[in-house]
Image (cartoon, grey):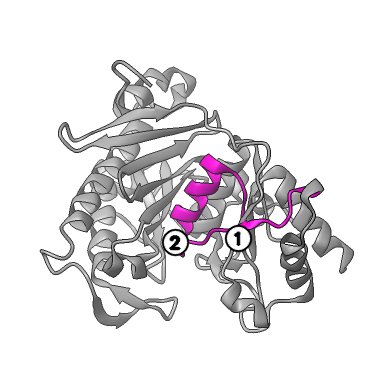
Amino acid sequence: MTGFQPTLNQFIRARQEDYPEAVGEFSQVMNAIALAGKLISREINLAGLVAATGYTGRTNVQGEEVAKLDDWSNDLIIDLLGETGCVCVMCSEEVEGAITPSKSASAGRYAVSFDPVDGSSNIDIAAPVGTIFSIQRRVTKSGVGHLEDLLQPGRNQAAAGYILYGSSTMFVYTTGKGVHAFTLDPTMGEFHLTFADLKFPEKSNVYSTNEGNAGTWLEPDVEWVEWLKQNDPETGRPYSARYIGALVADFHRILLKGGIFAYPKNTVQREGKLRLLYECSPLAFMAEQAGGLATDGLKRILDIEPTGLHQRTPYYIGNAREVELIRRFHSSSN
């Protein structure tokens, strides 16, 4: 793209007329997330110099080691969102229960779920990581937000997105009217529009999954990957494997290049590994806006009714054709 491209803030403000009920509060929430992204990006770029690599020695509610950057980024996002006065309640991968902002919590119109640093194990090797967020309109009438404001199906999302920290820092989001990507210009400290109305390529022969777990996969997933590897040029097989090991980075690649990302359940993780509210639902919302699909193998991710903040699910997301294919493998086994 050539010439001046609008900043993220300009782009959001230009579309406020589509959401007259928001009265500017949505912009404040998005600006807070964007500011968090800029600060996290700076910290990641300086990680080796400011001792931001490594672990705190604690484990989070998921039973996972907490990286130093996870801890810092989690507190940063909570503080920035709380200061807006527009968020009534939050939940994070790093915190067991609902988080109530300290400032004007009863007036907030929005509930926000987030993963502060997805793929944090990649930090120490300078590989891509990301932040994922989901914004819901509150359903309770007033007062401090409650679990029911957070535990909404993905189809109700007001907005969802991610910030990718890699060779460049990108802010990618949707409000249900297309997927738009902005790249951070570090000399100006602004995100500028680089891709408007992103769509998955119609065809691709790439799959992204951790085949190290294949020994514990269930039969439909084993059969699916074996089918992808067969030599059949007429159907574009064999497929190529691409796996980064950070959900945001793997999703970003297939959004731009096409393909499918899969994290199946297995005999050890019967409910799957990835979390519904702040990992799977936000990206599923984006995928559908970009012409793709997301499923747990049989059911649309956006139709799953959450029952807990850290609920897990099997996950398949990407090109519509590829997701329909894995759904057929699962349907035939039932």
SS of the residue under disc 2: loop
- Residue 246 covered by magenta stretch: yes
Residue 92 percent location from the top left of the image = 39, 62
Image position, residue 101 (x, y; %)? 29, 54
On residue 104, the disc is none
Structural crowding at the residue carrying mark 2, measured as other residues with C-alpha within 10 Å and reported as few (<14), some (14–19) or many (≥20): some
Q: Image quadrant for the N terminus?
A: top left
Q: From the viewer's perspective, is 327 left or right of 34?
A: right
Instruction: Give the label on residue 306, or none.
Output: 1
Amino acid type at image mark 2 = Ala
Residue sitting nearer the eye, 51 or 314: 51
Inspect this view and state whether residue 101 appears: yes
Between the C-alphas of marks 1 and 2, the distance is 23 Å
231 sits left or right of 279 in the view: right
Q: Is residue 185 magenta?
A: no
Residue 60 location, quadrant: bottom left
Residue nearest the observer in this picture, 233 or 84: 233
Q: Quadrant of the C terminus?
A: bottom right
Residue positioned most to the left: 49
Determine whether 7 is above or below 322 in the image.
Answer: above
Q: Residue at x 41, y 65 (%)?
A: 93
The residue depicted at 27 percent of the width and 37 percent of the height is 184
Circle count:
2
Q: SS at mark 1? A: loop
Q: To which residue does mark 2 refer? A: 246
The correct choice, above or below, for 212 with respect to 154 in the image is below
Check disc 1: other Cα within 10 Å, few if <14, some if 14-19, many if 20+: some
Quadrant of the image occupied by residue 96: bottom left
What percent of the width, then of the height, locates residue 158?
A: 50, 38
Amino acid at the residue labelled 1: Pro
Question: What is the magenta range?
Answer: 235-262
Is 144 left or right of 40, judged from the image as shown? right
